[in-house]
Every structure is written in C-alpha cells, then in structure tokens.
C-alpha cells in the first residue's frame, strides 16, 4: 500500500509541477512555435511509470488555458500515450540509448498530434487538405519539443538516477 501511495503522490507532484511550469511560462509554452519547459518532466515515467497519469492531468490543466477542446483532449492524450511508451521503454533498463529513446516519445507524439490540433485550430477540420501547413506545424512543435528534451530532459534523466535521494525514492515506488 505504501508503494501505491508514493506513486500517487509522485504523480500528483509531477502533474502539478507540469501545470504550474507551463502556465508560468505561458508565452513560450503555447502556440505553433513552443518551448514547453515542463515537457522535460516527461522523462519521469522512465523511472516511475505511474507518473504518466500525473503528466496527463497536468497537461489537461495547462491546456485549459488554450480554450481549444481539441488541444485539451488530444494534446493531453498525446502526453499520456507518450508517457506510457516512455514507461515501457524505461522497463528495458537505463542505458544512454534507452534514455534517449524515452526522451523521443514526447517529441514524436506531440509533433504529430499537436501539429494536427494547431492545423485544425487555424484551418478547420480538413487537416489533409492542408498537409503542407500540418507538416510545418508538426515540424515546429517537434523541433521545440526536441530542444526541450535534448537540452533539459535527457540531461535530467541522466543526472537524477545518480542522486541518492532520487534512487531511493524510485526503489520505494517499486
């Protein structure tokens, strides 16, 4: 029971941190060109799979500011799907390549899904007739996400396991 409580608490803290960071850094967190610093927290399912739910909840809360129902639903589902894939990758170990693969999940999911949401928001429901616009939006979102994950997420994912407090907490969550 203690393990489930720890995982739930970790998920809640990660979700709250995600929402607060996204909202606090709103000018760079929203739009076609975004550098959502909070996305660096998407590495957490590598270590504690249950934090996937916290990330999705934090994303829902942060996306409420957009007022775009598609972003609230599909953007948050993209975060959840990426987090589940990251958690699955994390079960394979903790090599540099595995960590990098885990960091790429949010890049791929957000580029495609958020790129589609942005295209829909500005061009209507027929995304396929605006394939060039979608490609541009996906590339912009993907590059911003890649920047966050390579500059912040990956170094954090390599640094945290070396810290005794973090390793101890992860062990207690198992």
Image (cartoon, helix red, strand yellow):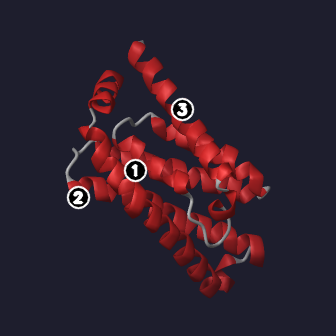
Q: In the structure shown, which secondary structural element does the residue marked by tag 3 occupy?
A: helix
Specify whether 141 is left or right of 121.
left
The relative height of residue 113 versus residue 16 in the rendered view (above or below) is: below
Spatial separation of the CA atoms under disc 1 and disc 3: 20 Å
- From the image, tell me which residue sits under label 1: 85
Q: Residue at x 40, y 37 (%)?
A: 49
Q: Secondary structure at mark 1?
A: helix
Which of the labelled discs sits on residue 48, or is there none? none
Instruction: Give the Cα distance between marks 3 and 2.
Output: 27 Å
**Distance Cα–Cα, label 1 vs label 2:** 15 Å
Residue at 44% across, 33% down: 50
Tell me whether the residue at label 3 lies in contact with that at label 2, contact meaning CB atoms closer than 8 angstroms: no
Q: Quadrant of residue 104?
A: bottom left
Q: Which residue is mark 3?
A: 13
Q: How many marks?
A: 3
Q: Report the front residue among 147 and 59.
A: 147
Residue labelled with disc 2: 97
Q: Say whether residue 19 is left or right of residue 41.
A: right
């Amino acid at each position: 029971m203690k393990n489930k409580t720890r995982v739930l608490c970790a998920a809640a803290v990660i979700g709250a941190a995600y929402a607060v960071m996204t909202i606090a850094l709103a000018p760079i967190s929203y739009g076609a060109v975004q550098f959502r610093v909070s996305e660096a927290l998407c590495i957490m399912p590598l270590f504690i799979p249950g934090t996937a739910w916290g990330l999705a909840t934090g994303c829902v809360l942060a996306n409420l500011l957009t007022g775009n129902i598609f972003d609230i639903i599909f953007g948050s589902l993209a975060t959840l799907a990426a987090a589940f894939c990251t958690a699955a990758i994390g079960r394979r170990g903790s090599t540099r390549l595995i960590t990098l693969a885990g960091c790429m999940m949010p890049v791929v999911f957000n580029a495609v899904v958020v790129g589609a949401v942005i295209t829909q928001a500005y061009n209507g429901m027929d995304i396929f007739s605006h394939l060039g616009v979608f490609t541009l939006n996906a590339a912009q979102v993907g590059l911003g996400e890649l920047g966050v994950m390579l500059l912040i997420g990956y170094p954090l994912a390599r640094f945290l396991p070396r810290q005794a407090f973090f390793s101890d907490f992860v062990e207690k969550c198992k």
